[in-house]
Amino acid sequence: MKFTILFSLAASLLLLSCQGKNTSGSADSNPETQASPAVRIPPFSADSAYRYIAEQVAFGPRVPGTEAHSRCAGYLAAELRRHGAQVTRQQAEVTRYDGTPLAITNLVGSFQPENPSRILLMAHWDSRPWADADPDPENHRKPIPGANDGASGVGVLLEIARLIAQDAPRLGVDILFFDAEDAGTPQWDKTPGENDESTWCLGSQYWAAHPHREDYTARFGILLDMVGGRGATFYQEGYSLDYAAPVVAKIWSQAAALGHSQYFPDQPGGYVTDDHLPINRSGRLPVADIVPYDRENGGFCTVWHTMADDLSFIDPATLRAVGETVAAVVWQEE
């Protein structure tokens, strides 16, 4: 579910002390990311990640049951294969909050599938069917463009897939794109159970109960959600700290080492029902969520679940900070 349900008192009392970000020059100005003298991490291209986002948005809203959704699924599978992944399409039928059956597709791209030591990277690829948080009530039943909410996490992971094809890390990597994350009860529906968390994250709920491989396991997982917005700040999400504190430590320490602390402050955030929660609760593997919190506006970001979630909100500098951090975690793992 894409809302914050609790914020710790300690977090609310902390003052944000980061310096303003430096946006001069290209987002890809560093020729190479080097978090450790012993490990070469291939350079993450924010411009490439941005192009992957733009290509998804060009299909239109990726709402299950639409032509845009079907065409985008084919594109994502083809891109994963192009970068050398073994692709699994996990197709299932789930039930939307109002009883509507939804045909969904989770996509898994496996690199070095024979390697028993694995890392799982995740994002959702569907987009919200309703702009139910839009300031204009006329937009409340329109599907959102979903540039940040959906496409940004996928864009970062497709760029990481490109890096893996060029210079593989020591562990096997699975990139998992969840469907129907954003099909939860809209704000305008006042039927009982409108805030039921089970109406969200339908693709990850299905995968947690029915993984693409029956015996699937990984050392840990990282979920990316809304990771391309201007001025995004990624606090340490509550369920991630509860279930996957060592994974949170890996991510935030790498961000600090790379100079991205302004995006990844070492401070706790709120509890967010997201695709990591069904997996953490299943006990299959610990998963940390990289998801923004906007303290000034008290939510995820100003364009969340609105028609303004388009390419104009995407900042290559944010993509670079997240992409370099996740790549450093993956390539540093032994």
Image: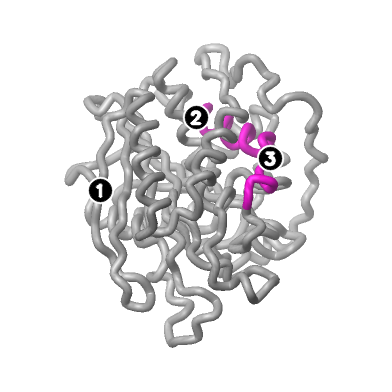
Q: Nearer the viewer, residue 260 or 92?
A: 92
Above/below status of 134 relative to 327: below
Q: Amino acid at mark 1?
A: Gln
Image position of 282 (left or right of 271)? left
Relative image position of residue 326 (x, y in whole percent)? 52, 33
Label 1 Cα neighbours within 10 Å, binned few <14 / some 14-19 / many ≥20: some
Q: CA distance from mark 2 to mark 3?
A: 15 Å
Q: Is residue 59 visible in the rendered structure shown here?
A: yes
Q: Amino acid at mark 2?
A: Glu
Residue occupying the far left of the picture: 214
Query: Which residue is painted at 53% across and 46% down in the image?
Result: 57
Q: CA distance from mark 3 to mark 1?
A: 32 Å
Relative image position of residue 130 (x, y in whole percent)? 52, 67
Q: Earlier in the sequence, mark 2 or mark 3?
A: 2
Query: Which residue is painted at 58% across and 49% down in the image?
Result: 148
Q: CA distance from mark 2 to mark 1?
A: 22 Å
Label 3 Cα neighbours within 10 Å, binned few <14 / some 14-19 / many ≥20: many
Image position of 82 (left or right of 46)? left
Instruction: Check contact, mark 3 vs mark 1: CB within 8 A.
Output: no
Task: Return the residue at label 1.
Answer: 90
Task: Return the residue at label 3.
Answer: 315
Query: Which residue is painted at 78% across and 24% down in the image?
Result: 25
Relative image position of residue 196 (x, y in whole percent)? 43, 76
SS for callout 2: helix
Q: Which residues are magenta?
A: 310-328
Q: Is residue 205 magenta?
A: no
Relative image position of residue 28 (x, y in whole percent)? 66, 23
Q: Amino acid at mark 3?
A: Asp
Q: What is the quadrant of residue 209 in the picture?
A: bottom left
Instruction: Check contact, mark 2 vs mark 3: CB within 8 A.
Output: no
Q: What is the quadrant of residue 325 in the picture?
A: top right
Task: Return the residue at label 2.
Answer: 159
